[in-house]
Amino acid sequence: MCGIVGYVGNKTACPILLNGLHRLEYRGYDSAGVAIIGADNELKIYKCKGKVDELENFIADKDTEGTVGIAHTRWATHGAPNNINAHPHLSQSGQIAMIHNGIIENFRVLKEALDKEGFDFRSSTDSEVLVNLIEHIRNVNGCPLEDAVRVALKRAVGAYAIAIIEKGNPNRIIAAKQSSPMAIGLGEPGEYYLSSDAASIIEYTKDFVYINDGEMAVLEKGKPLQVFSLDNEPVAFSTARLDLSISQLEKGGYEHFMLKEINEQPKTIIDCTRGRISPETLEITLNGVANNIDRFLNARRIIFVACGTSWHAALIGEHLFEDICRIPVEVEYASEFRYRNPVIFPDDVVIAVSQSGETADTLAAIELARKSGAFVYGINNVIGSSIARATDSGTYIHVGPEIGVASTKAFTGQVTVMTMMALMIAKRKGTVSDEYYREVSAALLKLPELIEETLKLDGEIAEMAKIFTYARNFIYLGRGYNYPTALEGALKLKEISYVHAEGYPAAEMKHGAIALIDAEMPSVAIVTPDSTYEKTLSNVEEVKARGGKIISVMAKGDELVRRISDFTIEVPVTTECLMPIVVSVPLQLLAYHIAVNKGRNVDQPRNLAKSVTVE
Ligand code: F6R
């Protein structure tokens, strides 16, 4: 994970770097640091444990003048989060400063070799090894810094997005990447920005160059951008425009990004379906599916690969594609799939689901699938992300930047896209009746209204959250389409409130987990009118009979469910396959309010990062 940012030009670098770091904090917030070269050509490095605010306080009275600089916010992988392990790292001579996002897997071997050459290491990071390797190569070969960087990177195994500045050279940043994201922002001619995420520097430029894996860029003040391969061949590059507004990156009056993003869902569903479902004919058109329809129609299987919340959305995708398209589906944790030597057929379709489009395990699973000749389709949010570029085709969910670490609007956007895909394919395959197609299509268009109505439950849910703030364990129960929703509800609570919660298929309870039930253990039961309604009701009765407290997420006005519930969250009803979208909203709110009551850092929960770019 980690976020990196850089600037070279005529402006004062430090405020730009700090602003970028604040926007990148979702990627990690264990420590932060900045390196700047001033007019005196000296290298100034300031870094400390903690968040960017702490760095800002720390450097408030320091000399931060200079027009070239690099900065880093860390999510610790190698080495504890402390001042010494914070980036930037300096080479032994103090000449070269480097920031790094990624992992150098062979750092131990490289370190041993450098130890023998007399290098001392201050930190326990893999990154310090890399900067010293660069210095060593330069010392031995007497070559320019960029040549030393190239040679060093050829010896490094792993993932990196690095940026380097050098004492005595206040005009230049050298940058390179392999499997970690990097965007180079173009300012005035000869002015450059650099970041792990283009959105973080959108107030300075909307024009970006995305260099590819195995490429290196030289950003030199007043000169054109140069991109090379690690074999020193010049590489042609293109510029992409990112249309994003600053307001999309701000809280817009909400106390937390998560709350803003929960409340945005009526609009994000509109954005996700806009131009894709005709309100007149109810016809669904996704270009990625239309252009590759034969791959889907001839698919032997669909394999979803994803992590975390995206994996939960994929579980709903499994229901949709099996139910509506009659295509066999497997859902895989990308991190397990990639190491399992899985059987993948050339006529399989692999669908990679990811909000960030940068999750390292999902990227690796895509690579594996491509090697097997399968067609790889992406469902992503971040435009131009690594996964979007690595897949054969795909559909963006278009829900806008998701900044709260806990995923909310991306989940509902992913399920929306999967529903549109399934309907489109099913129609061509002839596995869906025209009536059902039109029913679900119309229901998708009506969803924003239903979510708007559901959001009105916020006050009620906040009150309920007060009662359950101090419960130590929760269980979330659901069946069918809503079993994944139960998993997702439990994950939301765990990650932002640090309360233990488990999602469970309601019927499985009696095979073990029911032993946990007592008066102290609230069960959040999803009991909405669907094909498993009666069965779920019986499962909830079983919990109730053992003294469990029941919070039901249920259809508005359902007397039967009310009677067996201690607390109710009454939501509007839509067609069965879309109920997870409606139901997930109050579960997001419940987790949010419990976390706020507990005084947690909702947007940046401990130990987590938004974009998991390490394996
Ligand atoms: C949970 C959450 C994570 C992500 C997971 C995958 O709220 O945000 O579980 O869903 O890290 O990330 P993406 O979707 O970016 O691949």
Image (cartoon, helix red, strand yellow):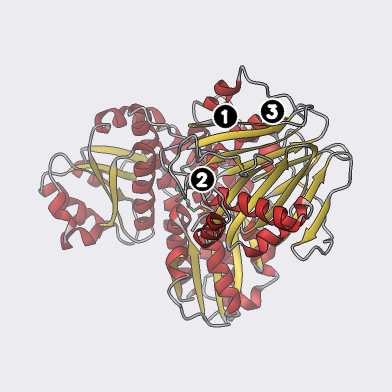
Q: Nearer the viewer, mark 3 or mark 1?
A: 3
Distance from mark 2 CB to nearest ligand 1 atom below 8 Å: yes
> Would you identify the image quadrant in which residue 319 lies?
bottom left
Alpha-carbon span between mark 3 and mark 1: 23 Å
The residue beneath circle 1 is 251
Q: Earlier in the sequence, mark 3 or mark 2?
A: 3
Q: Earlier in the sequence, mark 3 or mark 1?
A: 3
Determine the residue positioned at 61% across, 44% down: 92
Q: Position of residue 404 (x, y in %)?
A: 51, 38
Mark 1 Cα shell of 10 Å, populated few (<14), some (14-19), many (≥20):
some
Mark 3 Cα shell of 10 Å, populated few (<14), some (14-19), many (≥20):
many
Vertical placement of residue 160 versus 261, above or below: below
Query: For this view, does 262 lie left or right of residue 211?
Result: left
Query: For this view, does 478 lie left or right of residue 575?
Result: left
Determine the residue positioned at 57% across, 29% down: 251
Alpha-carbon span between mark 2 and mark 1: 17 Å
Q: Which numbered circle lies on residue 610?
A: 2
